[in-house]
Amino acid sequence: MNRVDGGCARDLGWLVANGPSERTCDGSTRLPAVSIMYARGTTAQRWNDYPNIGIADVLTVYAR
């Protein structure tokens, strides 16, 4: 869930799932091949702003 999709340095959002083919931006190459990054706090963050980005262990989605 991006707020801004402006290329690696300007990507801004709340949640992103990286897959094996997402290896072009610095934020995705420092992680395992499959990972989920989320913005810490209550606002969207730039994906290369590492202190404000968390790495999820699990993502659960409930649908009714």
Image (cartoon, rainbow, N blue to C red):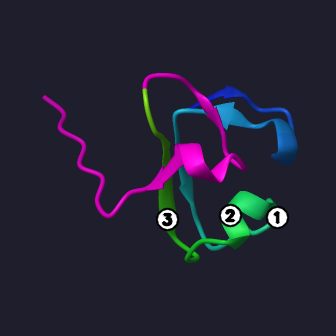
Q: Is residue 32 magenta?
A: no
Query: In the rendered image, which quarter is residue 31 located in?
Result: bottom right
What amino acid type should be assigned to the residue bearing mark 1? Thr
- Label 2 near label 3: C-beta < 8 Å? yes
From mark 2 to mark 1, how far is it between C-alphas? Answer: 7 Å
Image vertical order of residue 60 relative to residue 28, above or below: above
Instruction: Name the residue at 55% across, 77% down.
Output: 32
Query: In the rendered image, which quarter is residue 58 located in?
Result: bottom left
User: Where does residue 53 sit, x and y in percent of width and height?
Assistant: 54, 48
What amino acid type should be assigned to the residue bearing mark 2? Ser
- Label 1 near label 2: C-beta < 8 Å? yes
Check disc 3: other Cα within 10 Å, few if <14, some if 14-19, many if 20+: some
Q: Which residues are magenta?
A: 42-64
Residue picked out by circle 1: 24
Q: Is residue 54 magenta?
A: yes
Q: Please state if 19 lies on the left or on the right of 38 as rendered.
A: right
Residue picked out by circle 2: 28
Mark 2 lies on a secondary structure that is: helix
What amino acid type should be assigned to the residue bearing mark 3? Ser
User: Where does residue 40 sit, x and y in percent of width and height?
Assistant: 45, 38
Residue picked out by circle 3: 35
Quadrant in the picture for the N terminus: top right
